[in-house]
Amino acid sequence: MDGKRLSYLAVVALLTALVFYSFSPPGWEKQYRATGEALEKAMSYRISITTRGKDGDTFELEREANCPADYHSLQRHYAKDGSLIPQEDIEVWSLGKTHVLRQNNTLMNASFGPPQCGDQHLLELGTLPSSKIILMHGHAVRGSKKTIDGLTCRLWTVQMPAGDGWGDLYTMCVDDNNLPLEVVTTNGTVAHASHWNEKIELPEPPEVPQAGRQN
């Protein structure tokens, strides 16, 4: 094969690579989509979320779930002085056809929606932009690795346009299965997740006193 032919093939190969790269999603987008797909397929998890309010109060939420419908959650709200706000001390048991709510010290039967399973809302934490908005307008910066609960994960800093540059929204640490082990937002919320796709032994719902039953 002569030199001209080799040069021609080299140019074609280079142009092909450039075209492929220009139409391929960037690395952060591949990872973000992969994490979304992994969340959609997740069948169980445990997650704890702590949010610091502007007034110094603290919101805590713990949830463990076996998808698509069984879960146990505990929600608490602490005032600035550390005291528990009773009306926001809420616990939920949803196991099979049994659904029990405890608010402060009162137990009652109630109907609930399913836990957050099969979607990307776990990355929104109630206040963050949706995954669709992130993919349309934001990006993420690949960071170093860290270890959480003995598992290695990669840090990604998710950003949105701010002024003439980018502003950090949150960091998430993604494991080898593309699932988030930790999400830390710039507004003071920390989410810690574990036991992805492991069978979780949920606590049995307590017996509701007759007076607390609802028809």
Image (spheres, grey):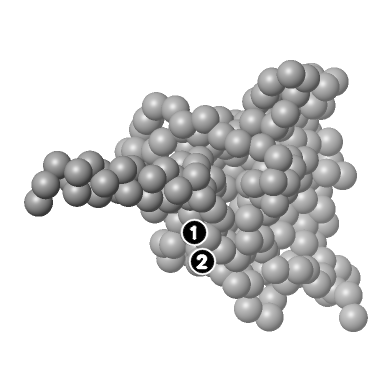
In the image shown, does 129 or 52 lie closer to the viewer? 129
Q: Kindly indicate the quadrant of the structure image that contains residue 112.
A: bottom right
Q: Nearer the viewer, residue 70 or 164?
A: 164
Residue 46 appears in the picture as rendered: no
Q: Is residue 103 visible?
A: yes
Q: Quadrant of the C terminus?
A: bottom right
Label 2–label 1 contact, CB within 8 A: yes
Q: In x, y percent, where is residue 159?
A: 64, 31
Up-down: is 97 above or below 124? below
Relative to 98, does residue 76 appear above or below in the rendering? above
In this view, the residue in front, 78 or 37, is 37
Query: Where, by quadrant of the figure, is residue 151 drawn?
Result: top left
The residue wearing badge 2 is 41
Location of residue 13 in the rendering, given as x and y in whole percent from the top left corner: 30, 48
Decide which of 154, 208 is in the foreground and name it: 154
Label 1: few (<14), some or many (≥20) within 10 Å?
A: some
- Under circle 2, the secondary element is helix
Give residue 38's mark: 1
With 167 as the anchor, is 48 left or right in this view?
left
Is the residue 138 above or below the residue 161 in the image? below
> Rounded to the nearest whole Å, what is the CA distance between mark 2 and mark 1?
5 Å
- Image disc number at residue 143: none
Q: Residues within 10 Å of mark 2 (few under 14, many from 20)?
A: some
- Which residue type does callout 1 highlight? Ala
Secondary structure under the numbered disc 1 in the rendered image: helix
Q: Which residue appears at 83% of the width and 36% of the height?
A: 85
Residue at 32% x, 49% y is 12
The residue sitting at 67% across, 24% down in the picture is: 166
Residue type pointed to by label 2: Lys
